Image (cartoon, helix red, strand yellow):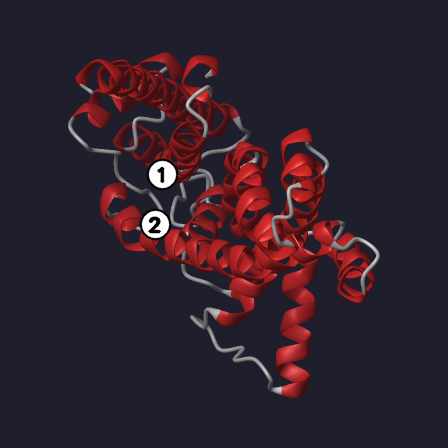
Amino acid sequence: MDHRITPVTAGLAAFLVRRLLTALVFVLIVSSSALVLARLAPGDAATGSSLQTSQTQLDATRARLHLDRPVAWQLADWFGGLARLDLGRSSLYDQPVTGLLRERAPRTAALASVALAIAAAVALPLGMVTGAKPRGLVARLVTPISLALVSCPPLIGALALLWLALSTHWLPATTGSLAVPALALALPLAATMERLQSQAIADALAAPDLLAAAARGIPPTRLVWVHAMRQSLRPVLGIFGIVIGSVFSGSLAVEWVTSWPGLGRLMYDAVINRDVFLVTGCAFVGAALIALGNLIADLARAVVDPRVQEGL
Protein backbone atom coordinates (compact mmCIF):
# COMPACT_ATOMS: atom_id res chain seq x y z
CA MET A 1 0.00 0.00 0.00
CA ASP A 2 2.86 2.39 0.72
CA HIS A 3 4.14 2.00 -2.86
CA ARG A 4 0.77 3.17 -4.19
CA ILE A 5 0.35 6.12 -1.84
CA THR A 6 3.86 7.57 -1.97
CA PRO A 7 3.90 8.67 -5.66
CA VAL A 8 0.47 10.31 -5.28
CA THR A 9 1.53 12.14 -2.13
CA ALA A 10 4.81 13.25 -3.70
CA GLY A 11 3.01 14.39 -6.85
CA LEU A 12 0.50 16.41 -4.84
CA ALA A 13 3.29 17.99 -2.79
CA ALA A 14 5.20 18.99 -5.93
CA PHE A 15 1.99 20.34 -7.44
CA LEU A 16 1.34 22.41 -4.30
CA VAL A 17 4.87 23.84 -4.37
CA ARG A 18 4.52 24.85 -8.03
CA ARG A 19 1.19 26.54 -7.41
CA LEU A 20 2.52 28.37 -4.33
CA LEU A 21 5.46 29.72 -6.31
CA THR A 22 3.14 30.81 -9.13
CA ALA A 23 0.85 32.55 -6.63
CA LEU A 24 3.82 34.34 -5.03
CA VAL A 25 5.07 35.61 -8.39
CA PHE A 26 1.55 36.77 -9.31
CA VAL A 27 1.13 38.73 -6.07
CA LEU A 28 4.54 40.39 -6.36
CA ILE A 29 3.99 41.40 -9.99
CA VAL A 30 0.54 42.87 -9.30
CA SER A 31 1.63 44.83 -6.24
CA SER A 32 4.86 46.15 -7.77
CA SER A 33 2.99 47.18 -10.93
CA ALA A 34 0.46 49.03 -8.79
CA LEU A 35 3.25 50.92 -7.00
CA VAL A 36 4.98 51.90 -10.25
CA LEU A 37 1.75 53.03 -11.92
CA ALA A 38 0.62 55.00 -8.87
CA ARG A 39 4.05 56.61 -8.61
CA LEU A 40 4.22 57.56 -12.31
CA ALA A 41 0.67 58.93 -12.45
CA PRO A 42 0.36 62.75 -12.66
CA GLY A 43 0.37 64.48 -9.29
CA ASP A 44 1.11 63.03 -5.88
CA ALA A 45 -0.09 63.12 -2.28
CA ALA A 46 1.70 66.43 -1.68
CA THR A 47 0.09 68.31 -4.55
CA GLY A 48 -3.27 66.73 -3.73
CA SER A 49 -3.27 68.19 -0.23
CA SER A 50 -4.88 71.56 0.34
CA LEU A 51 -2.69 72.16 3.39
CA GLN A 52 0.42 72.98 1.35
CA THR A 53 0.73 76.69 0.59
CA SER A 54 4.36 77.07 -0.50
CA GLN A 55 7.00 75.21 -2.46
CA THR A 56 8.97 74.67 0.74
CA GLN A 57 6.03 72.87 2.33
CA LEU A 58 5.50 70.80 -0.82
CA ASP A 59 9.16 69.75 -0.83
CA ALA A 60 9.02 68.88 2.87
CA THR A 61 5.92 66.75 2.36
CA ARG A 62 7.46 64.94 -0.60
CA ALA A 63 10.60 64.24 1.42
CA ARG A 64 8.56 62.92 4.36
CA LEU A 65 6.59 60.62 2.07
CA HIS A 66 9.72 59.64 0.10
CA LEU A 67 8.12 61.00 -3.08
CA ASP A 68 11.34 62.78 -3.96
CA ARG A 69 13.12 59.45 -4.42
CA PRO A 70 13.34 57.54 -7.75
CA VAL A 71 10.70 54.92 -8.47
CA ALA A 72 13.30 52.13 -8.39
CA TRP A 73 14.43 53.18 -4.91
CA GLN A 74 10.84 53.36 -3.69
CA LEU A 75 10.09 49.92 -5.10
CA ALA A 76 13.15 48.41 -3.46
CA ASP A 77 12.27 50.10 -0.17
CA TRP A 78 8.71 48.71 -0.36
CA PHE A 79 9.98 45.17 -0.96
CA GLY A 80 12.32 45.57 1.99
CA GLY A 81 9.39 46.60 4.17
CA LEU A 82 7.32 43.71 2.84
CA ALA A 83 9.91 41.29 4.18
CA ARG A 84 9.19 42.79 7.64
CA LEU A 85 5.40 42.83 7.01
CA ASP A 86 5.58 46.62 6.82
CA LEU A 87 3.62 47.97 3.83
CA GLY A 88 4.47 51.61 4.48
CA ARG A 89 2.43 54.48 5.85
CA SER A 90 -0.72 55.94 4.35
CA SER A 91 -0.43 59.62 3.48
CA LEU A 92 -4.21 59.94 3.49
CA TYR A 93 -4.95 58.45 6.91
CA ASP A 94 -1.49 58.97 8.45
CA GLN A 95 -1.59 55.39 9.68
CA PRO A 96 0.34 52.21 8.87
CA VAL A 97 -1.09 50.61 5.75
CA THR A 98 -0.91 47.17 7.39
CA GLY A 99 -3.40 48.20 10.08
CA LEU A 100 -5.85 49.65 7.56
CA LEU A 101 -5.70 46.50 5.45
CA ARG A 102 -6.08 44.25 8.48
CA GLU A 103 -9.36 46.02 9.20
CA ARG A 104 -10.77 46.09 5.65
CA ALA A 105 -9.51 42.87 4.00
CA PRO A 106 -11.64 40.47 6.12
CA ARG A 107 -14.76 42.39 5.06
CA THR A 108 -13.95 41.98 1.37
CA ALA A 109 -13.13 38.31 1.94
CA ALA A 110 -16.43 37.83 3.82
CA LEU A 111 -18.40 39.53 1.03
CA ALA A 112 -16.77 37.41 -1.67
CA SER A 113 -17.22 34.21 0.36
CA VAL A 114 -20.93 34.84 0.95
CA ALA A 115 -21.44 35.67 -2.74
CA LEU A 116 -19.64 32.47 -3.78
CA ALA A 117 -21.66 30.38 -1.33
CA ILE A 118 -24.98 31.83 -2.55
CA ALA A 119 -24.00 31.38 -6.19
CA ALA A 120 -22.85 27.78 -5.73
CA ALA A 121 -25.90 26.80 -3.66
CA VAL A 122 -28.27 28.15 -6.33
CA ALA A 123 -26.37 27.47 -9.55
CA LEU A 124 -25.05 23.93 -9.16
CA PRO A 125 -28.40 22.19 -8.48
CA LEU A 126 -30.11 24.24 -11.19
CA GLY A 127 -27.32 23.39 -13.62
CA MET A 128 -27.80 19.71 -12.84
CA VAL A 129 -31.51 19.93 -13.68
CA THR A 130 -31.16 22.06 -16.81
CA GLY A 131 -28.30 19.91 -18.10
CA ALA A 132 -30.14 16.65 -17.51
CA LYS A 133 -33.44 17.90 -19.00
CA PRO A 134 -32.58 20.73 -21.43
CA ARG A 135 -36.13 20.75 -22.84
CA GLY A 136 -37.87 20.63 -19.48
CA LEU A 137 -39.88 23.37 -17.81
CA VAL A 138 -37.09 24.33 -15.40
CA ALA A 139 -34.61 24.74 -18.25
CA ARG A 140 -37.04 26.89 -20.23
CA LEU A 141 -37.45 29.20 -17.24
CA VAL A 142 -33.87 29.28 -15.98
CA THR A 143 -31.91 29.49 -19.25
CA PRO A 144 -33.12 32.93 -20.45
CA ILE A 145 -32.71 34.36 -16.94
CA SER A 146 -29.17 33.00 -16.73
CA LEU A 147 -28.26 34.40 -20.14
CA ALA A 148 -29.56 37.83 -19.11
CA LEU A 149 -27.68 37.80 -15.81
CA VAL A 150 -24.43 36.62 -17.40
CA SER A 151 -24.36 39.80 -19.51
CA CYS A 152 -25.18 42.03 -16.52
CA PRO A 153 -22.10 43.57 -14.84
CA PRO A 154 -22.12 43.44 -11.01
CA LEU A 155 -22.08 47.25 -10.91
CA ILE A 156 -25.37 47.46 -12.85
CA GLY A 157 -26.82 44.73 -10.68
CA ALA A 158 -25.82 46.62 -7.53
CA LEU A 159 -27.54 49.78 -8.75
CA ALA A 160 -30.69 47.83 -9.66
CA LEU A 161 -30.74 46.09 -6.27
CA LEU A 162 -30.24 49.40 -4.47
CA TRP A 163 -33.21 50.86 -6.34
CA LEU A 164 -35.26 47.78 -5.44
CA ALA A 165 -34.23 47.99 -1.78
CA LEU A 166 -35.03 51.70 -1.51
CA SER A 167 -38.36 51.49 -3.33
CA THR A 168 -39.75 48.27 -1.87
CA HIS A 169 -37.78 47.80 1.39
CA TRP A 170 -37.49 44.10 0.57
CA LEU A 171 -33.75 44.31 1.16
CA PRO A 172 -31.82 46.32 3.76
CA ALA A 173 -30.05 49.25 2.12
CA THR A 174 -28.22 50.66 5.13
CA THR A 175 -24.44 51.13 5.10
CA GLY A 176 -22.73 47.92 6.16
CA SER A 177 -25.61 45.65 5.14
CA LEU A 178 -24.39 42.53 3.36
CA ALA A 179 -27.54 41.67 1.39
CA VAL A 180 -27.29 44.06 -1.58
CA PRO A 181 -23.54 43.74 -2.35
CA ALA A 182 -23.60 39.95 -1.86
CA LEU A 183 -26.56 39.51 -4.21
CA ALA A 184 -25.06 41.91 -6.76
CA LEU A 185 -21.99 39.68 -6.95
CA ALA A 186 -23.82 36.36 -6.57
CA LEU A 187 -26.49 36.71 -9.29
CA PRO A 188 -24.25 37.05 -12.38
CA LEU A 189 -21.85 34.55 -10.86
CA ALA A 190 -24.68 32.06 -10.27
CA ALA A 191 -25.83 32.50 -13.88
CA THR A 192 -22.32 31.76 -15.18
CA MET A 193 -21.92 28.72 -12.96
CA GLU A 194 -25.38 27.41 -13.90
CA ARG A 195 -24.52 27.56 -17.60
CA LEU A 196 -21.19 25.81 -17.01
CA GLN A 197 -22.70 23.13 -14.80
CA SER A 198 -25.52 22.54 -17.28
CA GLN A 199 -23.08 22.01 -20.15
CA ALA A 200 -20.84 19.80 -18.00
CA ILE A 201 -23.78 17.57 -17.05
CA ALA A 202 -24.94 17.32 -20.66
CA ASP A 203 -21.43 16.34 -21.77
CA ALA A 204 -21.11 13.80 -18.95
CA LEU A 205 -24.43 12.14 -19.80
CA ALA A 206 -23.31 11.82 -23.44
CA ALA A 207 -20.05 10.10 -22.43
CA PRO A 208 -19.74 6.42 -23.49
CA ASP A 209 -19.37 5.09 -19.94
CA LEU A 210 -22.58 6.75 -18.76
CA LEU A 211 -24.45 5.65 -21.86
CA ALA A 212 -23.33 2.12 -21.07
CA ALA A 213 -24.38 2.55 -17.44
CA ALA A 214 -27.83 3.71 -18.56
CA ALA A 215 -28.09 0.67 -20.85
CA ARG A 216 -27.32 -1.59 -17.86
CA GLY A 217 -30.42 -0.23 -16.11
CA ILE A 218 -28.97 2.25 -13.59
CA PRO A 219 -31.85 4.50 -12.46
CA PRO A 220 -31.83 7.97 -14.13
CA THR A 221 -31.71 9.77 -10.77
CA ARG A 222 -28.59 7.90 -9.66
CA LEU A 223 -27.07 8.31 -13.12
CA VAL A 224 -27.43 12.11 -12.98
CA TRP A 225 -26.89 12.94 -9.33
CA VAL A 226 -24.07 10.48 -8.64
CA HIS A 227 -22.20 9.41 -11.76
CA ALA A 228 -22.73 12.46 -14.01
CA MET A 229 -22.23 14.89 -11.13
CA ARG A 230 -18.90 13.28 -10.29
CA GLN A 231 -17.68 13.63 -13.88
CA SER A 232 -18.96 17.21 -14.17
CA LEU A 233 -16.80 18.37 -11.26
CA ARG A 234 -13.61 18.38 -13.33
CA PRO A 235 -14.60 21.01 -15.94
CA VAL A 236 -16.51 23.10 -13.39
CA LEU A 237 -13.59 23.22 -10.97
CA GLY A 238 -11.33 23.99 -13.92
CA ILE A 239 -12.86 27.47 -14.30
CA PHE A 240 -13.44 28.07 -10.58
CA GLY A 241 -10.17 29.97 -10.28
CA ILE A 242 -11.37 32.42 -12.95
CA VAL A 243 -14.71 32.69 -11.14
CA ILE A 244 -12.99 33.55 -7.87
CA GLY A 245 -10.89 36.20 -9.60
CA SER A 246 -14.00 37.76 -11.15
CA VAL A 247 -15.69 37.91 -7.75
CA PHE A 248 -12.85 39.84 -6.14
CA SER A 249 -12.41 42.17 -9.11
CA GLY A 250 -16.14 42.84 -9.33
CA SER A 251 -16.41 43.41 -5.59
CA LEU A 252 -14.28 46.57 -5.78
CA ALA A 253 -16.91 48.47 -7.80
CA VAL A 254 -19.81 46.92 -5.88
CA GLU A 255 -18.29 47.90 -2.53
CA TRP A 256 -17.93 51.50 -3.66
CA VAL A 257 -21.52 51.75 -4.90
CA THR A 258 -23.07 50.04 -1.87
CA SER A 259 -20.75 51.70 0.70
CA TRP A 260 -19.49 48.33 1.89
CA PRO A 261 -16.42 49.12 4.04
CA GLY A 262 -13.95 46.80 2.34
CA LEU A 263 -10.91 47.04 0.12
CA GLY A 264 -12.90 48.52 -2.77
CA ARG A 265 -13.77 51.71 -0.96
CA LEU A 266 -10.28 51.94 0.51
CA MET A 267 -8.69 51.53 -2.92
CA TYR A 268 -10.95 54.22 -4.39
CA ASP A 269 -9.99 56.70 -1.67
CA ALA A 270 -6.32 55.82 -2.10
CA VAL A 271 -6.39 56.39 -5.87
CA ILE A 272 -8.31 59.67 -5.62
CA ASN A 273 -5.89 61.01 -3.02
CA ARG A 274 -2.76 59.61 -4.76
CA ASP A 275 -1.80 57.54 -1.73
CA VAL A 276 0.94 55.40 -3.29
CA PHE A 277 1.54 52.99 -0.43
CA LEU A 278 -2.16 52.47 0.26
CA VAL A 279 -2.83 51.76 -3.42
CA THR A 280 0.03 49.27 -3.42
CA GLY A 281 -1.14 47.63 -0.21
CA CYS A 282 -4.70 47.23 -1.50
CA ALA A 283 -3.39 45.70 -4.73
CA PHE A 284 -1.14 43.37 -2.73
CA VAL A 285 -3.95 42.06 -0.52
CA GLY A 286 -6.42 41.83 -3.40
CA ALA A 287 -3.93 39.83 -5.45
CA ALA A 288 -3.20 37.61 -2.45
CA LEU A 289 -6.90 36.84 -1.99
CA ILE A 290 -7.27 36.01 -5.69
CA ALA A 291 -4.16 33.80 -5.56
CA LEU A 292 -5.49 32.01 -2.47
CA GLY A 293 -8.83 31.36 -4.15
CA ASN A 294 -7.11 30.02 -7.26
CA LEU A 295 -4.88 27.81 -5.13
CA ILE A 296 -7.88 26.30 -3.34
CA ALA A 297 -9.63 25.68 -6.68
CA ASP A 298 -6.51 24.05 -8.14
CA LEU A 299 -6.09 21.80 -5.11
CA ALA A 300 -9.74 20.73 -5.35
CA ARG A 301 -9.18 19.89 -9.03
CA ALA A 302 -6.05 17.93 -8.19
CA VAL A 303 -7.93 15.88 -5.59
CA VAL A 304 -10.86 15.19 -7.96
CA ASP A 305 -8.63 14.46 -10.97
CA PRO A 306 -5.02 13.41 -10.13
CA ARG A 307 -4.02 13.96 -13.78
CA VAL A 308 -4.16 17.71 -13.14
CA GLN A 309 -1.06 17.37 -10.92
CA GLU A 310 0.99 16.64 -14.03
CA GLY A 311 -0.60 19.30 -16.20
CA LEU A 312 -0.30 22.36 -13.97
| C-alpha gap between disc 2 and disc 1 | 7 Å
Which quadrant would the N terminus be assigned to in this image?
A: top left
Residue 14 appears left or right of 180: left
Upstream in sequence: badge 2 or badge 1: 2
Report which quarter residue 287 is drawn in: top left
Give the numbered dot on residue 285: 1
Measured from the top left, where is residue 6 in percent x and y? 22, 16
Left or right relative to 137: residue 60: left
Whether the residues at callouts 2 and 1 have beta carbons within 8 Å, the answer is yes
- Seen from the viewer's position, the closer of residues 228 and 117 is 228
Position of residue 62 in the picture relative to residue 36 (left or right) = left
Q: Can you give x and y, in whole percent of width and height, for residue 268 in the image? A: 50, 48
Give the x, y percent position of residue 113: 42, 54
Q: Is residue 147 above or below residue 293?
A: below
| Tag 2: amino acid | Ala
- Few, some or many C-alpha atoms within 10 Å of disc 1 (few <14, some 14-19, many ≥20)? some
Q: Residue type at mark 1?
A: Val
The residue tagged with tag 2: helix, strand or loop?
Answer: helix
268 relative to 158, above or below: above
Report which residue position mark 2 lands on.
105
Image coordinates of residue 186 in percent, x first then y, are: 57, 58
- Give SS at disc 1: helix
Q: Residue at x 47, y 57 (%)?
A: 117
> Which is nearer the eye, 176 or 122?
122
Number of the label disc, if any, that sits on residue 166 = none
Q: Where, by quadrant of the figure, is residue 278 drawn?
A: top left
Q: Which residue lies furthest to the left in this view?
A: 84
Q: Is residue 215 rendered to the left or right of residue 25? A: right
Q: Tell which of 275 and 282 is nearer to you.
A: 282
Residue sitting at the far front: 216
Seen at 27% across and 13% down, the residue is 7
Q: Which residue is drawn at 52% across and 51% down?
A: 251
